[in-house]
Image (tube, rainbow, N blue to C red):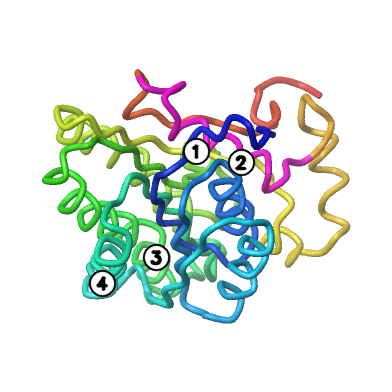
Amino acid sequence: MNNEGHRRLEGKVVIVTGAGSGIGEASARAFAREGATVVLVGRREQPLRANADVIESRGGAAFVIAADVSVATDADRIVGETVARFGRLDYLFNNAGIQGRGGPIVDMEEAAFDELLAINLKGPWLMTRAALRAMIPAGHGGAIVNTSSFLSTAATVGTSGYSASKAGLDAMIRAVALEAGPHGIRINNVNPGVIDTPMLRAHGDDIIPPLAERAALGRVGTANDIADAVIWLCTDEARFITGQSLLVDGGFTIPGPR
C-alpha cells in the first residue's frame, strides 16, 4: 500500500465499473488512495453511494453514475458525464461482470449465455469504445484494464458461457492494444484466480478451505490483491506493457499434483 507522500495517480480521473462490491469496491478505494478522482459505476446506486461515502470520508474524490454498461447509450453517457464534469478521462477499469446462470451446456438456456456475453464481454467493449473516443482526441494517453479470469484459459464443469465471455476479453485487448498504442493508451487484463468476494461466498463459506489448499501460496485471493495489480497496470511502472492478460491467482492454476 502506498503512503500519502507518493500518490502515483494524483490529478487523474478513472471510471470503475462494478464499483459497488468485491474487486470493484476495493479498486475504487485504491484508485482514490493513489490520488485519482473516481467515477463509480454500477446498476444499483445504493452500494455505489456507500462506497463513495467511504472514499470521501478518507479525503478522496468520488462521483456516482448508475448505469448499465451493456447498453451503448449508457456507456456513452458514463464517459460523457465524466469528461463534462472533470474535464478528462485517464483510466478505465472495466470490472462489471456476472457469474451468470451457468451449468452444463446441455442444460443451459440461450438467454443465460446471452446475458453473460452482454455484461462480461459486450459491456467492456462498449465502455472501451466510448472511453477511447474521448481519450484519443484528448491526446494525453492513459490506460484501460479489464477484469478477465483464470477461467479464460481453464475451466470447471458448468463454465462454458462464463469462460467464453472471459476468453473473448483476452482476445479483444490484443486488437485494441494495436489501435490505441499509437495514441499512448495501453490496455491490459487482470485475470483473477479464486478471490474471496461475495460472488464466491454465494457458493457457501465451506468452499474456501479446499480452494485455498490448492493454491501455491496457501490461500484464496482478496479483492485488494487484485486492486493492487489493477493500480500497477495503470501506473507508469507498467508503461511498456499492453495487450497482456496478467494472471493473479497465487499459483492456483500451476499444473501438476498437489
Q: Amino acid at mark 3?
A: Ile
Q: Image quarter for residue 91?
A: top left
Whichever of callouts 3 and 2 sits on the residue coming sooner in the sequence is: 3
Callout in the foreground (3, 2): 2
Mark nearest the camera among 3 and 1 is: 1
Residue sitting at 20 percent across and 35 percent down?
Answer: 175
Mark 2 lies on a secondary structure that is helix
Q: Nearer the viewer, residue 255 or 18?
A: 18
Q: As drawn, which residue projects farthest toward the left? A: 137
Q: What residue would you read off at disc 1?
A: 190
Q: Quarter of the image holding residue 213?
A: top right
Q: CA distance from mark 3 to mark 4?
A: 17 Å
Q: Which residue is mark 2?
A: 226
Disc 1 packing (10 Å; few <14; some 14–19; many ≥20): many
Which residue lies under the disc numbered 4? 77
Q: Position of residue 136 (x, y in %)?
A: 15, 43
Q: Secondary structure at mark 1?
A: strand
**Label 3 or label 1, whichever comes before in sequence order:** 3
Q: Position of residue 46 (x, y in %)?
A: 59, 81
Q: Which residue is mark 3?
A: 119
Numbered-mark total: 4
Q: Amino acid at mark 4?
A: Arg
Q: Which mark is residue 256?
A: none
Q: Earlier in the sequence, mark 3 or mark 4?
A: 4
- Rounded to the nearest angstrom, the CA distance separating label 1 from label 4 is 25 Å
Which percent across, then down, holds residue 196?
74, 51
Alpha carbons under labels 1 and 2: distance apart? 8 Å
Of badges 4 and 2, nearer the viewer stands: 4
- Split into 4 quadrants, where in the image is the N terminus? top right
- Which residue is painted at 11% across and 46% down in the image? 137
Majority secondary structure of the magenta segment?
Answer: helix
Answer left or right for 232 relative to 168.
right
